[in-house]
Amino acid sequence: MQSLPSTADRLNTIRRDFPILQRQVGDQPLVYLDNAATSQKPAAVLQTLDDYYRRYNANVHRGVHTLSEEATQAYEDARVRIARFINAPSAKQVIFTSGTTAGINLVAYTWGRANLGPGDEVLITEMEHHSNIVPWQILREQTGFTLRYVPITDEGLLDLSQLDQLLTERTKLFCFTHMSNVVGTINPVRELVQAAHAVGAKVLVDGAQSVPHLPVDVQALDVDFFVFSSHKMCGPTGLGVLYGKRELLEAMPPFMGGGDMIREVKLSGSKWNALPYKFEAGTPAIAEVIGLGAAVDYLSAIGMEFVHEHEQWLTRYAYEQLSTLAGLRILGPGPEQRGGLIAFTLNDVHPHDLSALLDRQGIAIRAGHHCAQPVHDRYGVVASARASFYLYNTPAEVDQLVVGLAQASSFFG
Amino acid sequence: MEALYREAILDHYKHPRYKGHLENPDIHYHDHNPFCGDELTIELKVENDVVVAVAFDGRGCAISQATASMLMEEIIGKSLTELKALDKEYILELLGIEIGPVRLKCALLSLKVLKAGIWGLEEWPE
């Protein structure tokens, strides 16, 4: 296999950017392999957050005083840079939410409620995260549309063999993940969007696991709605982005009502504010947005192509090494079709126990159903263990994981 | 590896006591932790308020299953009244280890199932 795209020097430099990677867990150095759950933050983002609160914290859009002007400038400037990161045509189409889950709910309760009724269909997939299943189930009870799903193959790919029967003129919305947080599959977004548009369906793509790890161009993908989270991409928690096509966002009724999303309020009725503010009621997560701006700058400077290549290499390596362990079953496809995460089971050893033993060695992985019970049902398991990588993980860390798993296997064997 | 999985716990996990089923149990209760897949059934035979036979069955992590096995050993010969008073502290002493909030749920599953069965619950109240 070719060598790792990152030289040892470059990887060390990147690792030094992340203060938390220096910490010990007990008396072991931290080996953080739970990036699909949340990512660590570079010093540049931490400094930005600190600087905001130390130097120019003020409410945005309101005040005419200096602090408010500075805060507003930084906030809206971050929005522009975030829009550029995903190649959105305009920053007005970048709506700040509290996360991916909130973004999907926003679409369900506004676009969904206005456009879905009996006789309509929404198509999701068997590999979705609960955030892209439950809001549609809830809405279905309220408005009466039919919810269908694309099954997955044994390999963990979307089974597109019957797609023309699932995606029909009755389908109003097709929602699917760009990259699964369990099977790791990277779905062919562009092709699926084209198929959906051909029957007049809109598309919502869950980019929570993709935006942090590979270059995303929402215009090239031609998605109608795209959602992702700040905390999975080196940014702070409590923040996400909903991108939408202009005409869709303009036509949608507002989500939450309150300050900032109105142009004019009279007791008799109110007029909605323009995009993006129509969907941003109340004081926003100002520090967090500015922090995400810094995260996006950091990732852009490193280059998302590079981040993706590094992870692809590491995942290929991890896949090969994990496959040498007797009784280890990887859920999902081979390295060419997946992103930087591997969920697996190891004989009868419960994922909790695996996780606990690895933790003793400073290794952080995740155990459970990862908020995706249907995909676990599909594989006939209740829970799995999951290792997920990011730009700062190393081959040596993968080796430690494998050694730790071998030990765990014999410990419980 | 030691702290959480001391000898006794590992032993009970690998060689569970009282694992199986009873004919015509007086008390039978099943529950599971959907977050991780630990599940447990406990069956008791009771005479004059005293537990005379026990069995448990289930699958799950070492902590949940080992605790169930250890608990079964302890409750034979005890009265239902005594068992109703068992609590989290009892389980922690039984296990003799430090346990964090996440794994605590695993450790308490068997007690939860036991008490629900004894109290005659249909379903665990939320």
Image (tube, grey):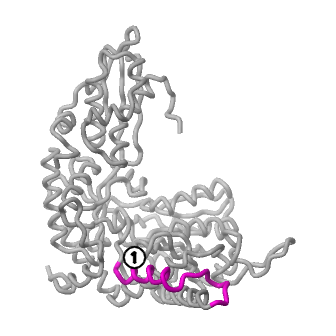
What residue occupies the far right of the structure in this picture? A268
Magenta residue check for A61: yes
At 65% from the left edge and 83% from the top edge, which residue is drawn? A275
Q: Chain of mark 1?
A: A
Residue A304's quadrant in the figure? Answer: bottom left
What residue occupies the far front of the structure in this picture? A54
Q: From where the camera sits, is residue A63 visible?
A: yes
Magenta residue check for A153: no
Q: Would you say A272 lies left or right of A57 here?
A: right
Residue A394's quadrant in the figure? Answer: bottom left
Residue B47 horizontal/vertical position (percent): 37, 9
Q: Would you say A94 lies left or right of A274 here?
A: left
Q: Which quarter of the figure is the C terminus of chain A placed in?
A: top left
Q: From where the camera sits, is residue B24 visible?
A: no
Residue type for callout 1: Met
User: Looking at this view, is A191 or A387 the one in front?
Assistant: A387
How many other residues sit within 10 Å of disc 1, few (<14), some (14-19) or many (≥20)? many
Q: Which residue is mark 1?
A: A233
User: Looking at this view, is A284 or A368 the one in front?
Assistant: A284
Residue B4 horizontal/vertical position (percent): 23, 45
What's the magenta region?
Answer: A42-65
Residue A139 horizontal/vertical position (percent): 63, 58
In the image, residue A208 above or below residue B30: below
At 53% from the left edge and 67% from the top edge, which residue is drawn? A167
Q: Which quarter of the figure is the N terminus of chain A placed in?
A: bottom left
What residue occupies the far top of the structure in this picture? B48
In the image, residue A97 above or below residue A365: below
Residue B66 horizontal/vertical position (percent): 25, 35
Element class at badge 1: loop
At 31% from the left edge and 27% from the top edge, which residue is drawn? B56
Q: Would you say A256 lies left or right of A72 here?
A: right
At 66% from the left edge and 56% from the top edge, which residue is drawn? A144
